[in-house]
Amino acid sequence: MIRTSLISLCLLSAASGAMAQPSLILTENGVDAIQATKEHPPLFAKAYRQAETRFARSIRDGLIVPVPTDPGGGYTHERHKENYKIIHDAGLLYQFTGEQKYLDHAEAYLLAYADMYTDLPLHPERKNQAPGKLFWQSLNEAVWLVYSIQGYDAIRDDLSPQSRERIETDLLRPMAEFLSTESPETFRKIHNHGTWAAAAVGMTGYALGDPELVERSLMGLDKDGTSGFLAQLDQLFSPDGYYTEGPYYQRYALMPFVLFGQAIENNEPDRKIFEYRDGILLKAITSTVQQSYGGKFFPINDAIREKGLDTIELVYGVAAAYSLTGDKGLLSIAEQQGVTVLTGDGLNVATSVANGDAEPFSYETMILSDGPDGNQGGLAILRMGKGDDAQTVVAKHTSQGMGHGHFDKLALILYDGGQEILTDYGAARFLNVPSKDGGRYLPENTSWAKQTVAHNTVVVNETTHFDGDWERAQESWPTIRFFETSDKVNIVSSTISDAYPDTDLTRTSLQISADDTRAPLLVDVFDVAAPKRSTIDLPFYFSGQLTDTDLPLQRYNARQTALGDKNGYQHLWTEAVADTPDGHSLFTWLNKDRFYTYHSLTSDAGEARIVRIGANDPNFNLRSQQGIMIRLKDSKTARFISVFEPHGTYDPAQEFTVESESQITSLQSTHKNRASLIRIEFSGGEALVIGLAEEPSDKKHTLTHDGRTYSWTGFYKIFRE
Amino acid sequence: MIRTSLISLCLLSAASGAMAQPSLILTENGVDAIQATKEHPPLFAKAYRQAETRFARSIRDGLIVPVPTDPGGGYTHERHKENYKIIHDAGLLYQFTGEQKYLDHAEAYLLAYADMYTDLPLHPERKNQAPGKLFWQSLNEAVWLVYSIQGYDAIRDDLSPQSRERIETDLLRPMAEFLSTESPETFRKIHNHGTWAAAAVGMTGYALGDPELVERSLMGLDKDGTSGFLAQLDQLFSPDGYYTEGPYYQRYALMPFVLFGQAIENNEPDRKIFEYRDGILLKAITSTVQQSYGGKFFPINDAIREKGLDTIELVYGVAAAYSLTGDKGLLSIAEQQGVTVLTGDGLNVATSVANGDAEPFSYETMILSDGPDGNQGGLAILRMGKGDDAQTVVAKHTSQGMGHGHFDKLALILYDGGQEILTDYGAARFLNVPSKDGGRYLPENTSWAKQTVAHNTVVVNETTHFDGDWERAQESWPTIRFFETSDKVNIVSSTISDAYPDTDLTRTSLQISADDTRAPLLVDVFDVAAPKRSTIDLPFYFSGQLTDTDLPLQRYNARQTALGDKNGYQHLWTEAVADTPDGHSLFTWLNKDRFYTYHSLTSDAGEARIVRIGANDPNFNLRSQQGIMIRLKDSKTARFISVFEPHGTYDPAQEFTVESESQITSLQSTHKNRASLIRIEFSGGEALVIGLAEEPSDKKHTLTHDGRTYSWTGFYKIFRE
């Protein structure tokens, strides 16, 4: 009740102004500041130029409002997408300049849509769920309205009453109803499709001065708070701002959150929406940036690997976050983006960047909890080193992440020297490429990319976690046992017991500074306890060219076959195989200008395979990439100790190569009384000894290795010799 | 005689000064200018900082002059390389600052070498030919002297007579003799090893005031001009400045030419060495730059693909060339290099760059003739478009290029949009990586990289050009039939008749601007006339991910085999195969943000294969890469028409994809009366018709295609419909 009356008050005051006063993302204050700026700073000027260019092209081409016929990527689809940008940009340019031509063009487009919209049937290319009218999915329709309503808001007060009436009655209100009351299933969804719909309807409510639409958006169709924007803010993000589908979908979901959040702030500041749930909107923005390396998002789950910080969603996000926090680290992200948004916030960012205020963004070691209550595992990000080349370990100890999640419990990614070293495949999809299944997710996304064997984690008996059933997978998640960060050691350890029936999977990953002059080591300990003897595989997919191994590999020289026939194994060629009689093996590869050695030590003798992605891929949908797979063939309990060591320099331009060979001379392990010692010795004679307990308790442990006794209290300790 | 007396005069005058007066690359004028510069411009400051850092590190570490034991890449090898840089840099820093510590350190190092050198045996790791003492090869020894003599030259006049005597008597003279009179075979070689030796000995002659050494270097061991520097200038470069081994070796060979050339110029300007042979030294420098794309050299022959414009050889080259020509385009190359040399020329470059004088380097369409007389074929470089993204076609119509040459007559590379699209493998070698056969050329360099099938050119009966015998290959070369460049069309055509016995191979490549709004097309016509029915293959290795084909490919899904068992075919996996019953096929791939469609039209029905490099590669020495191979199985004469069409945009960041499908709707050909028409029709209905005669004469040709008659005079004409 109180909420409703607040809204009414604000809307009343907004409507009482005599001049066009935009009030969604661009505000009167923003317009004043932009008009007062004699020379636009570069990032803003670029956005301004883009808008002018789009407008000029549209004036040249004339109105183009085709009857909707094509699916995603097709002509009418792309055209209607272009049109909402034209309406948006023309409206904003009208605000900045007061020039009638901009208003006229936005008005003409909106009237053209008003002529068509009410009589439109559902889209002919609609899929089973949530069809649109202008587009095959109602999702796109919501995006259309989120953009167009901003354009309309910018011209509304200066339109004739007749035009206003037609546009609102025949287009905006019907569309808002279509997206809410007429698509109740989507509108009630706690899902990014629901957020887009809520943002579209709510922003329309503010623009049209209709508190009912706003209320519906905030509190859900039934206005009881079980759905709608606030429920989405409560449930879609973890308390740390992690979005359960992962950063690729997070940045997409972010857009309606940021835009509607700003519209709420600008219209009803008393709601303190940016303080809602301990500032969850802001956390959602900054945690998205944290989930990136070298400008690209961590490609976990169904991610398009090319997506990064320069997406428009994050351009809006950074502008909003900077206005709220003044965090100068965000300015360096804006610099990378190379552009900003045409709002007061955007001008603010661009001006600060032009003033040289940017500071490096503070990428941190952290664990982002998953789940609405933050108790469904989490994404651990371990960082060591400075700047863009800092080594970064991503330990995916999260929950499933719904239908776009991959079956890769406890998976791992390693970045170093600016490169992705241990890789995640991401999605098998070529966005909007018609010849690749219309740009949709490819069959190989299911048969390969989602399968456990496609990831850097353990596979038991060549089957996929949770048998590949995402709804079952959704029911459980890893337990974070331990997470600690210090100057010289970052560590995370988690366990999950039902990825396979009655099987404990426990992974402990340590990022350790061995020596100030070297890149950090990644020491990874994977323990498996199965109910019966099993085949246990641990693959690592790497980026680079193999330069060395200590195994007598049997290479499949003139003939090679697929490794298996299901669960992703059918997509792997076996290129070479060797036994590992003493459990040891070593592989070195070259990535760009640095070498990486993978030292493996397993609890039992086993096999090592070099594999390559690409078998059973009739349409060449998969990328060709190598992996190393260690297999224990008949183990009930198994431990895989993996040490990843960056070393040396390869500089063909200056013609020098140093330390192309591993500087680790031995890797040994001792296990007793539920505690272990892992000893890593270097060529100079110095050594790192890692004491590791099975349980992260305060208990004291004492172990002897090679005549020396090591004692420690607690989960782990690093001894330097 | 006249030459000798000139030298004597100059040396006399140099020796008469009272102060240390360097006179090799750094000169007195240079020192004055450098001392007069209050704030070093950035490129110079960087080089200066590097020298100071090297010196400081060396002072910290103390003198380290190990007994030579290790081969290339090993510890003593790398140490002696570091030492010559220390001597060089310390000498120069002494000149700039007059600080005694620099002189002392260079002197101490030189004396330490003087203590050791005369008693040194030949290097224990020497190979069969041309051993050194400090290094396994005398080549490295010559490089040592080229650097160290510059350091010595910078301190000589200020040394005590005793030190001077010891260094010259026990080190420099013995080394100069070792490299010349004691290594006559190398010193007489018309080869870059010979040039390094000549430069080392000649520069030592100038520094020590010994005209005999200079004369020996210029005119050869026998002082008759049959060998030595001038003979090398006459014979190693074509009149256009092309070095027959290709750009990778050209930039390496360049260093002694540039350095000794400058030393000659500074000591004996009357020789006008930079005017010698119509300015061949300058042409050699600028033609090296021309043989690059995106900062990397064209990777033809035994090239390390990473090598590019930023190599130190070209840093010297650009500084020298800019001083000679004032060409501001060279400054943009210096900008890319990010550093310059510590000489007057270097300061000049750095100052001009800091003043903002840099202009884009003028990359041009050209043919660089090969052979000392310029009549042994040539390297055609076709360019269209602006800036770094200009499309560039490299047509390798050169001669063999000696022992480092590949058997790839008439091979082709295509660059577009800043990327290498149709690729050349380069060398199979990991420079200085001990685990990769000591960093030497790998066995797969011979079994794969040099073989014809590894290149984008025709293979007859699965054998290699000239049966893989480079000395036989060295005897012949293609005949350039035609080369022409215009605004809208660049064309080159060549033929060779003895790559295979009695077999004519003729390749005509046209780069055509089809439309101002599109990237140019590459239209490539390869004609083969064999003495009997043969299997004729034309492979194209491409960089990217296949997205489309119009062939019903039979994919080798769960099992694949090597394509052959010798001549490189053993290294190819067949991934898929299809018949091409009407001679047509189409393949589209995605490279970064652009699509490429390869349209093939052959004179007969045949087969198309998707192949991948990597079979029979026991040590993973080869890079994995795909190719498309068109095969005609039983043809006496064959024509392969290949059209490469860049199209569309793939932008996952902005989530749009346009024109992912080819815009060419048909490719047809008519052949009659020793002339042909090739008709390329586009989706908009417009067409390009290429009239092509068999002989590049002025004859008139008339052909009819599809009811239309086309007439033209001469070798070719483009009709636009």
Image (tube, coloured by chain):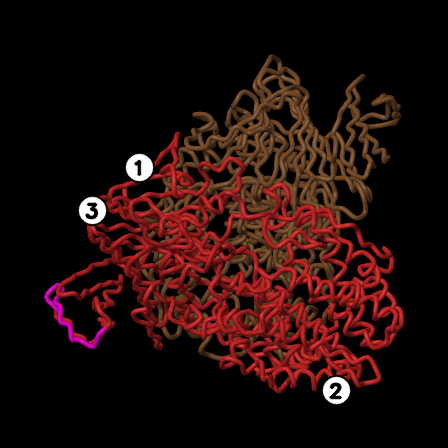
Chain colours: A red, B brown
**Where residue A557 sits in the image (x, y, percent)?**
38, 33
Element type at mark 2: helix
Of residue B711 and residue A145, the one placed in the foreground of this image is A145
Q: Residue at x 47, y 64 (%)?
A: A244
Q: CA distance from mark 1 to mark 2?
A: 79 Å
**Where residue B381 sits in the image (x, y, percent)?**
69, 42
- The residue that label 2 is drawn on is A13
Asked if both marks, 3 and 1, belong to the same chain, the answer given is yes
Element type at mark 1: strand
Q: CA distance from mark 2 to mark 3?
A: 73 Å
- Direction from residue B316 to residue A599 in the image, left or right: left
Task: State if disc 3 and disc 2 touch (CB < 8 Å).
Answer: no
Of residue B643 and residue B144, the one placed in the foreground of this image is B643
* Label 2 CA crowd tier, 10 Å (few <14, some 14–19, many 20+): few
Which contiguous range is marked in magenta? A697-708
Q: Which mark is residue A554?
A: 1
Q: Which mark is residue B398?
A: none
At label 2, the amino acid type is: Ser
* Label 3 CA crowd tier, 10 Å (few <14, some 14–19, many 20+): some
Is there any visible trace of residue A716 in the rendered image? no
Between circles 2 and 3, the one closer to the viewer is 2
